[in-house]
Amino acid sequence: MKKGIISILSLLFAMSILIIPGPSFACDICLLDSHDQMFIYSNMNVTPVVANAGEDVTVMVDVRNINGSAEETEVQLLINGEIADSRSVSLEAGEETTVTFIISEEEAGTYTIQIGYFLEELEIEDNSLPAPGIIFTLIAFMTITLFLYMKRTKS
């Protein structure tokens, strides 16, 4: 009988490894277990997902304490796998709060934003070039100026 129970438990454990998301997967609701403290992370949101270099980007996530007592947890924001910021959150049993981070990247490129198992891509664009409308206006102005200058020198 014990052998059968051990076999079933081993099978359940093996199956749980296959269905528990790892760091490279995103999920709608993620359960984080840290030193017997359990918190649910949900609704991660990155706004905007495309920003100019130096522009503020808001990253928010809901955190809920599902412990039977008040607990504290550290919510970490990772950018490209590196800890960029963290917030200590104290919640009563069953309480939920939204944790907000404001980030700003100076270099153009694609960044992976992660909180818990949530992953979002952030695209930072180089804003050093003027908008196409400004470039067109400058070219038109220079062309007209050159045309008028050439017309005046022929007269």
Image (spheres, grey):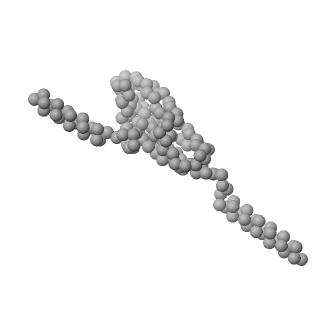
Q: Residue furthest left?
A: 1
Is residue 90 shown left or right of residue 140? left
Q: Position of residue 110 (x, y in %)?
A: 52, 48
**Number of numbered tags placed on the structure image:** 0
Quarter-wise, where is residue 64 in the image? top left
| 28 up-or-down from 74: above or below | below
Determine whether, in the image, residue 21 is placed left or right of residue 132.
left
Taking the view exactly as shown, the residue that stands out farthest to the top is 69
- State the residue in front, 13 or 32: 13
Q: Is residue 37 above or below residue 124?
A: above
Residue at (89%, 77%) from the top-left corner? 155
Q: Residue at x 41, y 24 (%)?
A: 71
Residue 34 makes an appearance in the image: yes
Q: Position of residue 41 (x, y in %)?
A: 40, 36
The picture places residue 19, in percent across and down from the top left corner, at 29, 41
Q: Does residue 88 sit above or below 148 in this rendering? A: above
Q: Quadrant of residue 38?
A: top left
Residue 29 in view of the camera: no
Residue 3 at x, y percent in the picture: 13, 30
Q: Residue furthest bottom?
A: 155
Residue at image position (45%, 38%) is 115
Q: Nearer the viewer, residue 123 or 31?
A: 123
Pick whichever, 121 or 73, lies toward us: 121
The quadrant of the picture occupied by the N terminus is top left
Residue in the image at 87% along x and 76% along y: 154
* Residue 57 in which image quadrant: top right
